Image: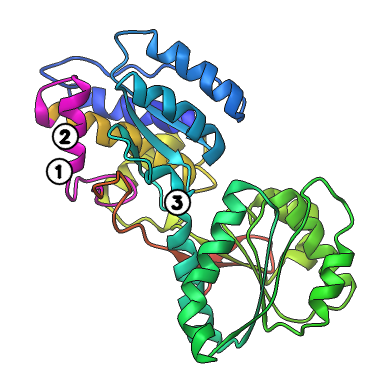
Amino acid sequence: MAVQSCQVAAELINKKGGLLGGRMVEIREFDDSGTPKDGALAAMKIVSQKDIVGVVSTYGSPTVEASSNIFEKRKMINIAYGATFVGLSKKNRNYFFRTCGRDDAQGIFFAKFMPEKFGVKRIAIVHNNTTFAIGVAEETKKALKPMLDSGAVELVFYDAVNPEDKDFTPVLTQMRETRPDVFYYTGHYPEGALIARQAKKIGINCIFVGSNAVINNDFVKIAGVDVAKGWMMTQEPMPSELPYKESKEFLAAYEQKYGEIPSSPWPIYAADGVNILAAAVEKTGSTEPGVLADYLHNDANGVPGVTGPIGFTAQGDREGVPYLMYVVNEKGAFVLLDK
């Protein structure tokens, strides 16, 4: 879906005349297999092609980390669409940007939303020892600290599971004894669905919330609708919730080409990687990486995008990424909690 989104974004740009007086945007695809090793190999292939202006890099922070080192060394603009690990933007990289949010934004949202909306006091957090999941869990704990220090809430359980396991009842049984009001699982959907089934089986009665890598169509399929319904999700706005003119234009073009709109926000952030890179080329009249990086760091402010106005911090992070709380309904679909 990310590749398809980039293709649609490029086609829309080209239909409007392309860039720099008529030059057409071309998308080239490189497979990184979702692993750091292959991410580095893909990056080496990309930087060897001298006519490539910039990269919309991959889903997954470890893979982005490996490829970003190469892009930075070779001075190539690198815009990540699905890498949320906070540490990616703390290495003084000049050519690294991201159109998605960071883990701390998701953690801050959970820490504010759940006590305010549901009045929860006793909180349990579990991750799966991956870079992403640890990041969300740790940033959530950090965001909760003022309330923990004041006694407004209590972190009654904090632990990890092995994502390769199939039986999570030992950890879940320990958690059950702490009587949490809410359980936040920050890992991924394959084990998350099994955790949901096993938690229900052993009688854990609390609010269940998954991070944005937990709740998706496969989570519902594996867990079953009867188990998945009621699970909540901290999530950037889903494509259908985007209110912008650019969103509607993009989604209409995507649906016309592929028969349906993307089922998650991540591919849309990839499209905006193309859009902001194209905007930088058009605004500066240049394809030189130093010129483009300077524009993105200093002058890109409120640039229209599919996911809303785009701008970056000095570190290359996207500014103002919103989060919402979704819930799985009786039909197994994701809807805004307030709907």
Contact? badges 2 and 1 (CB < 8 Å): yes
In magenta, the rendered stretch is: 283-312
Q: Earlier in the sequence, mark 3 or mark 2?
A: 3
> Magenta stretch containing residue 64, yes or no?
no
Where does residue 271 sit, x and y in percent of width and height?
37, 36
Q: CA distance from mark 3 to mark 2?
A: 22 Å
- Rendered image coloring scheme: rainbow
Residue type of the residue flagged with mark 2: Asp
Q: Which mark is residue 294?
A: 2
Q: Identify residue type, mark 1.
A: Asn
Tell me how many marks there are: 3
- SS of the residue under disc 2: helix
Q: Which mark is residue 298?
A: 1
Compare residues 118 and 108 and report the one nearer the observer.
Answer: 108
Q: Quick one: SS at disc 3?
A: helix
Residue 29 showing in the rendered view: no
Instruction: Name the residue at 32% across, 31% down.
Output: 274
Q: Amino acid at mark 3?
A: Val
**Majority SS type along the magenta span:** loop
The quarter of the displayed image where residue 6 is located: top left
The image shows residue 89, relative to residue 119, as above or below, that is: above
The residue identified by callout 3 is 86
Callout 1 crowding tier (Cα within 10 Å): few <14, some 14–19, many ≥20: few
